[in-house]
Image (spheres, rainbow, N blue to C red):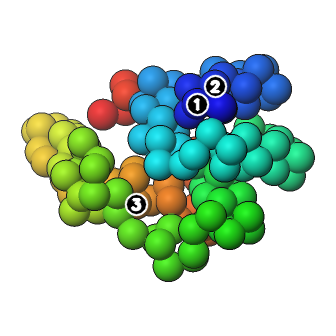
Amino acid sequence: MTPREAVTQVEDVYEKQFTLRQTTVFLIYLGKFTPEQLEKMTQKVIETCRYRPKVADFQTAATTLMFVTKKEAMKADPKCELCDGSGWEVTACTDPQSGDSVEAVQRCSCRTLRSIDRKEEVGSLADW
């Protein structure tokens, strides 16, 4: 199973499409696993998730199946194109008081989504 096939299978089972940003984060994260590991992780996620899973659910499955350790799961992805492995990314946003466009720093999704305790939904590219 390829990372794309895993994402497509999850989308089919839960009958809901991921945003482009979510799909990108999934593909980056899942790309480091072998096809056999992806198959087992995808089945575990489908068996255990009541709602559409997040990358953190795949991380939990990888940890449960002993493909990675919890400590490894918390590190930023050194190949991330958004943050260049720093774990932090600069985003443009609007200052609510002045209305000016400013830059803000936030945890990169490669690090945030790998957090096992992560429970929030990831925004779409339109939020950027």
* Residue at the (24%, 42%) spot, across then down: 81
Residue type of the residue flagged with mark 1: Thr
The location of residue 96, given as percent across then percent down, is 25, 45
Mark toward the start of the polypeptide (2 vs 3): 2
The location of residue 103, given as percent across then percent down, is 13, 48
Q: In the figure, is residue 32 to the left or right of 101? A: right
User: How many angstroms separate mark 1 from mark 3 (CA)?
Assistant: 22 Å
Q: Residue furthest bottom?
A: 71
Residue type of the residue flagged with mark 2: Glu
* Residue at the (50%, 60%) spot, across then down: 114
Mark 1 neighbour class, 10 Å CA radius: few under 14, some 14 to 19, many 20 or more = some
CB under 8 Å between discs 2 and 1: yes
Q: Is residue 97 above or below residue 1?
A: below
Residue at which label 2 appears: 5
* Residue at the (72%, 31%) spot, across then down: 10
Residue at which label 1 appears: 2
Residue at which label 3 appears: 111
